[in-house]
Image (cartoon, rainbow, N blue to C red):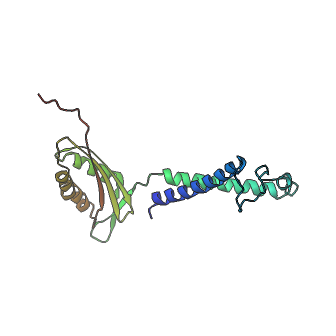
């Protein structure tokens, strides 16, 4: 399961849990019948009684434990947020030089080379490339904006057999899997006279 799909599933489950709990509290507060699993006896009963709220107030460990637990939750939430927002671009690629040694190729250099060569192709107005994956097995994600009246299948075939194959061979990679997204450049409507 990809990380983005896992994030969506976890967020969906947490959202459903919070929606269910919040909805049940609201429903009971508005006078709906109290469910059998409800921890209190009626709609006018509070969730935490005064005795439950002040029960641990005089112990030395209670407030440090509460604050430490909240701090851990905040740190976990910040860690999750940074992992979700961080762009996972490949910084460098390991290239086999053929003599038993290895060289490092900057990921940005290969991305720029892919984009520049794709733009030189007939019918391509703009190109962007992003490398992801591992240093020894990169994958490419390419966005091509095609000029009006360009056949997408011809542009895709020319890209995969030309630009992508050239980049794979230049980097000495056994394979370079790619996901190519094709879009047409917006243009004004033509007048027919």
Taking 186 as reference, is 112 above or below it? below
Identify which residue is drawn at 72% across, 48% down: 29
Relative image position of residue 18 (x, y in whole percent): 62, 53
Quadrant of the rendering where the N terminus is positioned: bottom left
The tally of labels here is 0
Instruction: Tell me if 15 is positioned left or right of 41 in this view.
Output: left
Residue at the extreme right of the image, as rendered: 58
Residue at 25% x, 61% y: name it.
168
Relative depth, front residue between 101 and 20: 20
Q: Nearer the viewer, residue 88 or 40?
A: 40
**What is the quadrant of the C terminus in the image?**
top left
- Comparing 19 with 128, the one in front is 19
Q: Position of residue 153 (x, y in %)?
A: 19, 53
Which residue reaches farthest bottom?
100
Describe residue 148's horizontal placement relative to residue 67 as left or right.
left
Q: Whole-percent x and y of residue 143?
A: 30, 49
Residue at figure coordinates x 35%, y 61% from the top left? 138
Q: Examine the image and state in which quarter residue 134 appears.
A: bottom left
Which residue occupies the extreme left position in the image? 193
Residue under the point 88% across and 55% down: 58
User: Seen in the image, is 90 located left or right of residue 174?
Assistant: right
Left or right: 152, with 135 as reference point = left
Task: Please provide percent x and percent y for residue 64.
Answer: 78, 55
């Amino acid at each position: 399961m990809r990380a983005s799909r896992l994030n969506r599933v976890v967020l969906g489950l947490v959202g459903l849990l919070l929606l269910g709990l919040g909805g049940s509290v609201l429903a009971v507060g508005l006078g709906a019948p109290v469910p059998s699993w409800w921890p209190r006896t009626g709609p006018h009963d509070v969730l935490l009684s005064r005795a439950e709220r002040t029960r641990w107030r005089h112990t030395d460990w209670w407030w440090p434990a509460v604050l430490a637990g909240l701090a851990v939750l905040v740190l976990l939430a910040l860690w999750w947020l940074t992992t979700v927002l961080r762009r996972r671009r490949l910084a460098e690629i390991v290239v086999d030089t053929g003599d038993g040694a290895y060289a490092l190729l900057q990921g940005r250099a290969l991305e720029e080379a892919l984009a520049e060569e794709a733009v030189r192709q007939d019918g391509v107005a703009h190109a962007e490339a992003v490398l992801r994956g591992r240093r020894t097995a990169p994958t490419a994600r390419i966005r091509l904006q095609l000029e009006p009246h360009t056949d997408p299948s011809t542009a895709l075939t020319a890209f995969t057999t030309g630009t992508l194959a050239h980049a794979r061979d230049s980097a000495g990679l056994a394979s370079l899997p790619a996901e190519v997204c094709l879009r047409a450049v917006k243009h004004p409507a033509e007048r027919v006279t």
